Amino acid sequence: MLATLILSLAVAGTPQDTARRTAPDSSAPAVRTARADARQLTAVTVRAETSRSKRYLVPATSSATRTHVPLREVPQSVTVLGAPILADLRIQSMAAAVEYLPGITMGQGEGHRDAPTIRGQSSTADFFVDGVRDDAQYLRDTYNVQQIDAVKGANAAVFGRGGGGGIINRVSKRAEWAPAYFGRVETGSWNQRRTTVDLNQPFGTSAAGRLNAMYENSASFRRGMGYDKWGANPTATLMIGRVQLRAGAERYVDHRTVDRGLPSANGRPSRLDTRVFVGNPDASRSGITVNGANTQLEFDNGHGFTFRSHSRAWRYDKRYQNVFATSAINAAGTQFSLGAYRDAVDRRSLFTQNDALWMVDGRGLRSTLLVGTELSRQRSDQRRETGYFDNTTTALVASVAAPTVRTPVTFRPSATDASHDATASVAAVFVQEQLHLGRFVQLVAGVRHDRFTIDVLNRRTASRLARTDHLLSPRAAVIVTPAANVSLYGSHSVSFLPSTGDQFTSLSVTTQTLEPERFRNHEVGFNWNVRPAFAVTAAYYAVDRTNTMAPDPLDATRIVQSGHQRTTGAEVGVQGSPLPRWNVTGGIAVQDARIVSRTLSARPGATVPLVPRTAASLFNKVQLHRRVALGAGIVHQTRRFAAIDNAVTLPAFTRVDGGAYVSLSRGFLVQLNIENLFDTRYFATSHGNNNIMPGAPRAFRLAFGLQP
């Protein structure tokens, strides 16, 4: 237990050293203009990587504005989890990442997909990779991720449709100019086994290659639960004069047991053993294969003009089936019901984004004008089948005494099961101006127009439906910088979600007639760099979701768009090094997400599920010795509702994590992470009232490897 206390290695570097450095932003590389420059920059890059490699604060990003700017010049809340944080906290999934992203919680996602709730808005599609949409339903890994940027608040002027509460952007690792060879082997509780490699090699001064790869085969504290996954992501970078060309490909395969958790009882999670599997683990399986390639071209003329083009072609082949609880445990506490279904989606996506950037500086004004376009086409083939127990019935009564069942299940289409071929196309143009009026005031204004078209063939009925929407998404903000290290901002932004929902796999005669839902985000906040390596941020916001479907009060057979949801909240974040040997990351969010006007699924006054009134997390890392560091983390959430009917409450919880880090010779590191140090029984999340996921008991994770 002593070794359990806390986490992570620090940096040998003084505050003066930190002040002289500028952080490289892996999402917005600078183009080298000559071979001599490339040689010189190589040396600078090596020093920056090694000296800052353990620092938590990432001072700049391009995720929020598509331009590389300091975070204090972004007029909305952004939390960045850089590579040191991902390594120190063993963040290998999106669910683990959002625990340290204020204002975001992760849903269970039916045990097979990422499903965050951002500022009260639940989505399975608001994910991006290097600024390009990655909206398929699967569980993402971080083996090839340099940093994770959470951009909170509606931001369609930059990202397009959806993103009503915000988006999560993964910045990929890519081929760079300094040689680097890293690897890591991990083991731990419940037969956890994982290996990752990261190999980067320059070839002269104008080319570089990199390979990131991962394999994991692990079980879980949940009996019958396990997964096997692997990924490989080669990338290359080529410099040709003033043109930088990057290319990459990835294959990612994930096979796992689909675990839907426990049912409820009497308005609370049931008292079933948290280790027991509810349903049939043999018939609850998922598999996804992700194949794709991308290219990024950047040209800089050296006189303030930059052109960028980014294309991604991706295919997601997803299959899953599950047997899960469909009811609460009965009043006698003896039994509950099970159901089953199978679903398959084959999605092919092609995105092309082009940005032209002009920067002009003179006479007290500094202008950054961005003009861009996006073209995309996504085709989704979805088929769903219902599960029949003993090939006869769609419902099975299970005993509390024996919740794991082995009753044979067959899957076949029912009359209402989906069988759709859907094509979604987008043609968009956007413009954004970042105008500095002297030293103290900056204006940010932008607008985006999307032409969104969806065409759906329903194979069950042989009918075809289509709809086209024109979405105009404005953004306006003012930033005041009374001092070089402080900024205050206020912003207004709008986003839209077409009536087909965020996966765009179906369209009905009802949704074909409906206008898109609208999200309005109003936000004020500040960013304060207390010292060069330590920042404090704060924001107050209100998000209004309108045009939501609701029953017509005068005619129950009709749908109207009078539904309204509002989220108000405040968040504070801290990140960086308050003292030279102390790193910290975390924050607190206080939110109230409620239904203002009746919707199809909720009454007025209902609280949005999985939005705790207060959520807080904090991780501290202290360097005790040149080779030894300890750290401690805490994650706290107040009670939440499991579903929009507010019938089941998930209790509040506080979890404490710990770790220890020992740096050996030649760059080797031994890392011990202990999750849930005090073995607290808690419930992490849910998918509705009767698929409640218990948190893991105390777990040990040991890693050994060569680190950056």
Image (tube, rainbow, N blue to C red):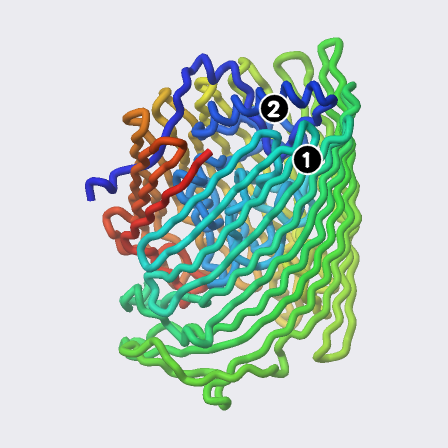
Residue bearing the label numbered 1: 475
**At 28% from the left edge and 76% from the top edge, which residue is drawn?**
333
- Could you classify mark 1 by the number of other residues whose Cα lies within 10 Å: few (under 14), some (14-19), or many (20 or more)? many
Q: From this view, report whether residue 105 is shown above or below residue 524.
A: below
Where residue 39 sits: x, y (%)? 65, 21
Front residue of this view, candidates 645 and 450: 450
Where residue 11 sits: x, y (%)? 40, 25
Residue bearing the label numbered 2: 42
**At 40% from the left edge and 41% from the top edge, which residue is drawn?**
705
Q: Return the disc, 1 or 2, that comes first in the chain's sequence.
A: 2
| Amino acid type indicated by mark 1 | Arg
**At 61% from the left edge and 14% from the top edge, which residue is drawn?**
440
Where residue 412 sits: x, y (%)? 58, 83
Q: From this view, report whether residue 226 is shown above or below residue 204.
A: below
| Amino acid type indicated by mark 2 | Thr
User: Secondary structure beneath disc 2?
Assistant: helix
